[in-house]
Image (cartoon, rainbow, N blue to C red):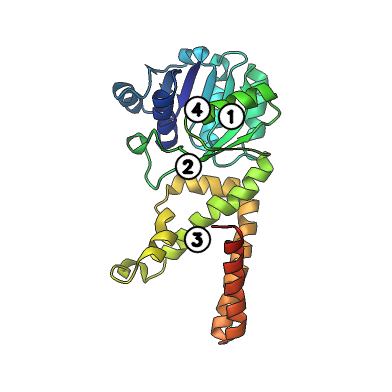
Amino acid sequence: MNIAVIGLGIIGGSFCKAIKKYTDHYLIGINRTPETAQKAFEVGAIDEVGTQESLGKADLVILAMYPQADIEYIEKNGSYIKKGAIVTDASGIKSAICPQLKELAQKYGFVFVGSHPMAGKEKNGFDVSDSELYKGASFIITPCGADQRCVDLLSDFAKSIGFGIIKITTPEEHDRMIAFTSQLPHVLACAYVLSPCCPNHKGFSAGSYRDVSRVANINSKLWSELFLENKEPLVKELDILVENITNISNAIKSENKEELTKLLEQGHKVKESLGE
């Protein structure tokens, strides 16, 4: 199979390196900055530095850019994509972009299947991409009306490069759950390190500080776009979090040990019930 990866940052670069390591697929790499694509070619992460015309060879096209950049790329280059090819995105949101990409698929004759690799690092760029990034990770597929053959092909492809869990869902359910599992922790981490105590944490911190603050090392441009494109589910989760924190804060302020113990025990039981 011929595969084109558009966007060679950490996500796209890791796709390329995993594909080259674990499969025999022919790989075309395209990037906004040609220097990065050339570097990927020189280190053997791709077989070809792609052009618009190269898209016509691809059986599978992976969009690994920012959400709106994915749409803009297809609007500009969709006519070069082979009829019947599968196009998937690696974006962290779905409801805001899947309808537009599905419409473009109908216009240009390819098949769109949404997807989201649940993996990443705190750093960005091709240089930190990793062939093992997706090992054991979850790969979420939002079919968006694509037939089962295309969904199965994408699922089998994901398994072949190391993904351990394949989750099929709707764009709406994806965004609702991602607001909780991914976006909310990033908001929490950023809010946490804004404390005036943070610059002086060394010598006073151990695992708790490290665990809560880890994802504050954020790509602010990307995550701002993700947050705003998923506004309603994320704000709902933020409101729940604020309510829970307020309840705990009020119990501490009023020195209500019974209420405080109850709230902490509720959290403990939820986590324990998950077997984590």
Q: Earlier in the sequence, mark 3 or mark 4?
A: 4
> Which element type, helix, strand or loop, lies under badge 2?
loop
Which residue type carries mark 3? Leu
Establish if 233 lies above or below 148.
below
User: Could you tell me residue 87's position as x and y percent?
Assistant: 57, 24
> Which element type, helix, strand or loop, lies under badge 1?
helix
Q: Which mark is residue 47?
A: none
Which residue type carries mark 1? Ser
Asked if labels 3 and 2 touch by Cβ distance under 8 angstroms, the answer is: no
User: Could you tell me residue 34's position as x and y percent?
Assistant: 35, 24
Q: Earlier in the sequence, mark 2 or mark 1?
A: 2
Dot 4: few (<14), some (14–19), or many (≥20) neighbours within 10 Å? some
Q: CA distance from mark 3 to mark 4?
A: 34 Å
Q: Label 4: which residue?
A: 160
Residue at coordinates 59% horizontally, 64% vertically from top-left? 241
Residue at coordinates 58% horizontally, 29% vertically from top-left? 155
Image quadrant where one finds the C terminus: bottom right
Asked if labels 1 and 3 touch by Cβ distance under 8 angstroms, the answer is: no
Residue at coordinates 63% horizontally, 26% vertically from top-left? 152
The answer to which image quadrant residue 236 occupies is: bottom right
Which residue type carries mark 4? Ser
Q: CA distance from mark 4 to mark 2?
A: 16 Å
Q: Residue furthest front?
A: 275
Q: Label 2: which residue?
A: 119
User: Could you tell me residue 20's position as x and y percent?
Assistant: 40, 23
Q: CA distance from mark 4 to mark 1?
A: 9 Å
Q: Label 3: which residue?
A: 188
